Amino acid sequence: MGAMPFSELFKGKKVNRDYPSATKDGAFVPHLETSDKLAIVEEIERSGSVGFWATDHGGNTVYLSPAILECLGIEFCQLASVPLQQLLVPIDGESDGRSLGLKLNTRKSFVNLTVQSSNGARDTVLKLSGRPLYDAESNFVGFRGSAFDATEEFRSEEEASRLAKFDSLTGLANRHRMEQRIDSTLHAFRTAKRSAALMMLDLDKFKQVNDTLGHAAGDQLLQQVAERLRGIVAGRGEIGRLGGDEFQILVPDLDDRGKLGELAKKIIQALSQPYSVDEGRAIIGCSVGIAIAPYDGIEREELSRAADLALYASKNGGRGQFRFYASDLEHEANLRKRMEEDLADAIESGHFTLEYQPVVSLKDNRVVALEAQYCWADDERGRVESDTFLPVAEGSRLIVPIGEWGIRRACEDALTWPESLRVSLQVSPVQFEATGFVESIEGALDETGLDPTRLELRLPESVLLGDASKVDKVLATLFKLGLRLTLDQFGSGLSSLAYLRRAPLSALRIGANFFEPVMGNDLGDMELVRAVIALAGAMGMETMATGVHALDLMHELNRQGIDQVSGFVYSEALTPEQVCEELDKGDWVLAPTDSGTQRATRRTVFRKIGLIHEDHYYDVTLRNLSRSGAMIQGLEGVPVGTMFVLDFGQGQLAVCAVRRAMDDTQGVEFEQELVDDGAGGLCTRHRVSPYELAAAGAPLTALPPGKYSMAPESSSANSFAQFKLSSNAPSQTGKKEAA
């Protein structure tokens, strides 16, 4: 049965034809008969510009113009006893907040409600208007209304709105939308006591892409970055491009710093893979800063500033890193600036030295090479480890003159060793790309007279992913000089197999991080190791393993066919004088030992932390730290098995049990392992929630620096301290010393 004309609704109904004439400004206005009006309505229907609809007193649809039925993809037979609100639904965000059903039920007139078909068969958009109809006895008989096709207008407005909210190049949310999303999320989450993480991303070396390949290639790269981010985040959060090469990710309901760190690592690794653009091949990197609400900020401005500070710290830490916000980052930035200045002075004053870690052949345990490591003896700081100052030197490009000095000094030291020993140095990507890099090596070899075959350069994987023509030219020149080239830290996920074939490499050096998952599986799976060994063998390269500290791992690597090993399992780094002493003894053969395991897993520290036991708070000294435990000093008479809570500051509490007790020193084991903090240190997965502190009466603010603000005071009048402070305990800040 086809759609009936609008006039059919009025058949059989008594219609008042006694319309009075009217005048307007003295002009006579004739009236039309009802039949004539209906004819006009039907003509309008046939034009398709406007349609009409009607419901009965029960809300069921009794009429829809044929044009409406057609554009919505609805058959006339579907109208029988179907409420209008089941056929047409308001478009999200386009109504005044009240559904069509509610409007019909309240029997109030409405105008220009934006609706679409409920079945989604067509993308037609209608503007719907209607008014209630009553009979002569004031009985409600239904609604009558009109509708016109507003699809084009709606799509145009929708596109304009999209352009106002989304980045036109990448399709990601723009700065304005991200600000709105963060504001609304934080506001809603405060009420619900939920958390949210904000990640700030900055692309490393993107400017070089624009400068060398052009802005069109840069645009293509940014589009690919957006696609990679979508694949990683996969609906878990909102991604925005703030402008240029800055991106932002809002991740709701995630405050686990272990999981956030893993997400940041995935992002950094994915964005560091090569990009194919019309002008060629491009390589960039990524740095990430992370802040978490409500811990690091309550309002958007506060949280964004915290994430910015963390990003700044990660970029200054050598790029290609992530950092969590910490309250001391501003202080750290000032210290970093001062360190840069002191490093520049140290180059001139000769305060740098080299130490050498033996590289041992697993065939006979003979030392075959010595890996140079930088050391800085500062007048104020004392001995500064390379992990501390090299990232600063890298960010400030001071690594270039430091590297030049290191190559020359290593060549000079190697002249005093047997000719069978080679010297190995790590080359920074900044150093490799610097003008005059090859010339500085040639100069060092000429001045010292060292046989080039005894000099080994360890190249990080990121070097191979630079400008292909430049990389190939430099590597070819170094190879012609006779140097040994080794790919350093293989297994970080950046290597291209194609480049492994092209580059004149002598060895693959597997980093310590490559073995962490293996060790975590109790050596149950060495398939990746075997694959690397097979790959190296097929390409005629040796294999080296660094950071090997456990005896069982060393034995397993030996069974798998690894050629050479360095790490605490054989020896720690030695001074040049100690190297000469060992060489004077004759053949240098080292016996592996398991004593290096603790040296590797424990990080030596010396700082004051808090310790909570029952209702008392003590200040103690943290002597060393690992993922699973720590050593503390300051309390006497602590039995094994005692439960403590360690307060590392800024809401970081770790529940632990005493496993060893020696005088005023205790070894403790954590209930939950610590995680990487992105800066080479460790942190707790979770922190004391500001919501919990607010529930206890404290104001709702970001976590302050220092101790846990709700920690009990040892001066409580209703209790006494169970443990005595030793003479090695630090001063008890703000509290009476426990007796």
Image: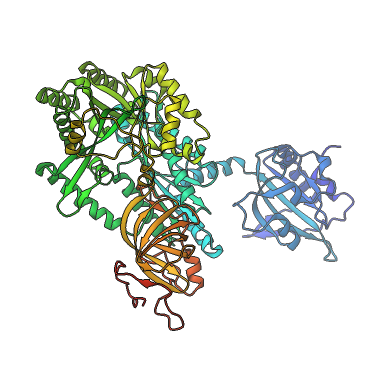
Point 35% across, 17% down: residue: 502
Q: Quadrant of the C terminus?
A: bottom left
Point 47% across, 39% down: residue: 519
- Examine the rendered structure and indicate whether residue 735 appears above or below residue 387: below
- Examine the rendered structure and indicate whether residue 424 appears above or below residue 85: above
Point 79% across, 38% down: residue: 75
Q: On the rendered structure, is 372 left or right of 298?
A: left
- Residue at the limit of the structure toward the bottom, as seen here: 717
Q: How is the image coloured?
A: rainbow
How many discs mark residues in the rendered view? 0
- In this rendered view, identify the residue nearer to me: 561 or 513: 561
Q: Quadrant of the N terminus?
A: top right
Q: Residue 18: give x, y in percent of width and height.
A: 81, 58
Q: On the rendered structure, is 3 left or right of 321?
A: right
The answer to whether residue 4 is seen in the rendering is no
- In this rendered view, identify the residue nearer to me: 581 or 532: 581
Q: Residue 292: give x, y in percent of width and height.
A: 44, 56
- In this rendered view, identify the residue nearer to me: 68 or 309: 309
- Residue at the limit of the structure toward the right, as seen here: 12
Q: On the rendered structure, is 171 left or right of 484?
A: right
Point 29% across, 66% down: residue: 728
Q: Residue 518: give x, y in percent of width and height.
A: 48, 36
Q: Residue 133: give x, y in percent of width and height.
A: 78, 59
Q: Quadrant of residue 246?
A: top left
The answer to whether residue 674 is seen in the rendering is yes
- Examine the rendered structure and indicate whether residue 352 appears above or below residue 283: below
